[in-house]
Structures are given as structure tokens and as C-alpha cells.
Amino acid sequence: MAEADLGRAGVILDRLDVPPPELEQRTGWSIKSGGACRGEQCVPLSLPFDVRDLAGRLGMALVHDEEHGVWALGPQSGGRELASAELPDIVLPDRQGRDFALRSLRGTKVFMIAWASW
Amino acid sequence: MEVVSVALDTGGLEAAGPWIDRARSTHPALIDQGHLLDEQLGVVNVPSGVWIDENGTIVRPPEPAFPWRPREPTEELLAQLPPLTVEQLREAQKMRIDPERYLAALRDWVAHGEGSRYALSPEQVLARSRPRDAAHARAAACFEIGQHLQRQGHSEDAARWFRAAHDLAPENWTYKRQAWSLADPLQGPTERYESDWLTEVRRLGAESYYPPLEL
């Protein structure tokens, strides 16, 4: 399966100068001197680090709710909703709240069905 | 083959848990409180099925997945339901679904694996995946902030962001239905939203609610 692809999911931020270790944990992008990298993809960045710079260079949506002081950093645009045919490394809780990694079903065919209570 | 169900519910365990209990499911029944499958796989409505092979490769991306035809409600049941629900059910019965063909295809894949003509190549899977333009990336961010505010108890403020997501990604029914259901469990007309499920389905035409199954 693909490596953790958290960068394709939106994240909520309460500041734009997110400490690099926190940003990496939440988006998969690691901030290095002069740039940001995730896997084999790297982009140059200006210093000091500001999420707006990363969002602009990667075509990530960044929306801000001024009243509540939060931003949402959306997924990258420009590609397709599926980055590859490899299933992203999805981990979700079950009925008991225990994390279940879809990766654990490797070796078996999986029929995944999305539903909702609404 | 293993079945995995995933509930797309901003309300999390509280919303989806009772349904899972009633179903007495023996398969992994997961809860996707953040609508991760919308963003990561491109799910836009429910039920959506995704087929994943033994190597963790998607061989059919999200598509309408009815393994069986829902039972028609009896007149006795209809008599006990709110009038809006009855109208919604009548509209739902006009929807074009194809459970017989879908289930036959699924069985064929389980039996024949990559030899099944229903197992798509990675190139075919990606070709079926919708492009994510700037509007759709922004819709995902708007929906994310709406969910965050909803969880913080700011329902009115959340609705502003949900409406923005609806405008940016009008084809995404999960964004709409999730938001409508938070304002009214029946997804009827409310002051918070300009539209509602029944109005939108009638505007679109119930027969176009699910895209044709392209097996």
C-alpha cells in the first residue's frame, strides 16, 4: 500500500507558523532548509516558514475562519482525487473505538462499502 | 474476501454506532468521522463500493454499490412515517440502481481475481478518478472547517462553511446530506440551507441521482 498520504486530507490549524515537526506529523510534509519534502516530491520555500507559502506552491486550499481563529488546509489540487491505484494507508476507528488499519487486510480481497447514518 | 463498511458520519460513534449494533455486523465496521474517504478516494455519495485486491491495489474506484435492491416499504410502514419521509422514499424508488449486475460482477471478481473482466487496471482506475481542481480542493477545506466548527458546537457558523463546500462541489452529495442532516435529521427544508434533499433530487431527477453503473 502507499505510504501514509495524510497530505491528501484536510487539516485544521490554529496558526500559520506551525512548528515544522507538527506540520510533518499532520500533513506528511517535512520542512528542511529552504524547502519542504514529502516522499520524492520537494518544493522550495521562503523563510521564515509560513503555511501560506507551502499552500500556494502546492495548490493546497487554505481557508480561514477569522471569528474562530482557525484555518483549514485542504488537499493539493491539480491531480486526481486518487493519487494512485494503491490504496492510501487509511486507519479508522471501529465500533469499539479501536484503530483499524486497512493495510492489515493485505493478502485478502476487500470490498469496502461507504455508507452513512443520515 | 473481507467486507469492510465505513460510515461517513461527522457525528462519529454516536451517530453510526446504533446502526452498526442493529446490523450485528461481523465484518470490520469502521467510522469515518472526518469524511476521509471523500478526500482520499473521491467518494461523493452513499452507498459507494471500492474493490481492493490482495496487494492493496484499488481495482474498482468508488461507484454506486447496491449489493441488493432495498425492500419496498409496505403501506403499513408508510402510514407510520412522517409525510416528508414518505415523499423521500417514493422519490428514492425512482432511482436507477442495478444491484443484480453489481453483485454478479462482485462475485465474478471474488472467483477470478485479476482474471475477472470487472477488475480494472491501475490506468483505468485513475482514468475514472475525477480531477481535483482548485474549487474541489477548496471545497474539501471548507467542509473540513465546517466539521471542526460543528464539533465545537458552533452549528450556525459551521453551516456557512458547509454551504461554501456545496457551492464549490455541487456533485458531492455526502457534503450536502451530512450538512442537511445536522440541521434536520430528516434533511427537510431549514432556514440554514437554501435547499434540501427532496428539492435537490427532484430538481436533478431521481433517475440521475446515481450515475449509471459502468461495469
Image: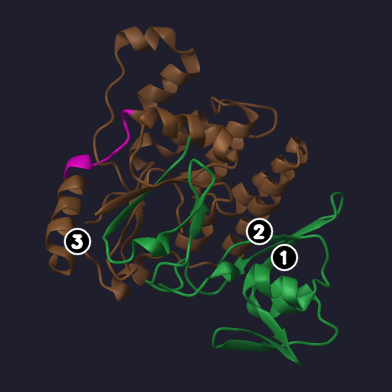
Q: Amino acid at mark 3?
A: Tyr
- Real-space Cα separation, disc 2 to disc 1, in angstroms: 7 Å
Residue placed at 55% from the left, 38% from the top?
A: B13
Residue A115 located left or right of residue A72: left
Residue placed at 49% from the left, 13% from the top?
A: B82
Pointers 2 and 1 within a single chain = no
x then y, percent, for residue B166? 60, 47
For marks 2 and 3, the one nearer the N-term is: 3
Which chain did the renderer colour green? Answer: A
| Residue ID for mark 3 | B118
**Disc 3: host chain:** B
The stretch of residues the image draws in magenta is: B93-100
Which chain did the renderer colour brown? Answer: B
x then y, percent, for residue B92? 36, 30
The reply to whether dot 2 and dot 1 touch (C-beta < 8 Å) is yes
Residue B149 to residue A89: above or below: above
Please name whichever residue, B34 or B210, is drawn nearer the observer in this view of the structure.
B34
Please name whichever residue, A34 or A24, is drawn nearer the observer in this view of the structure.
A24
| Residue ID for mark 2 | B141
Q: Amino acid at mark 1?
A: Leu
x then y, percent, for residue A87? 40, 67
Confirm whether residue A118 shows in the render: no
| Residue ID for mark 1 | A62
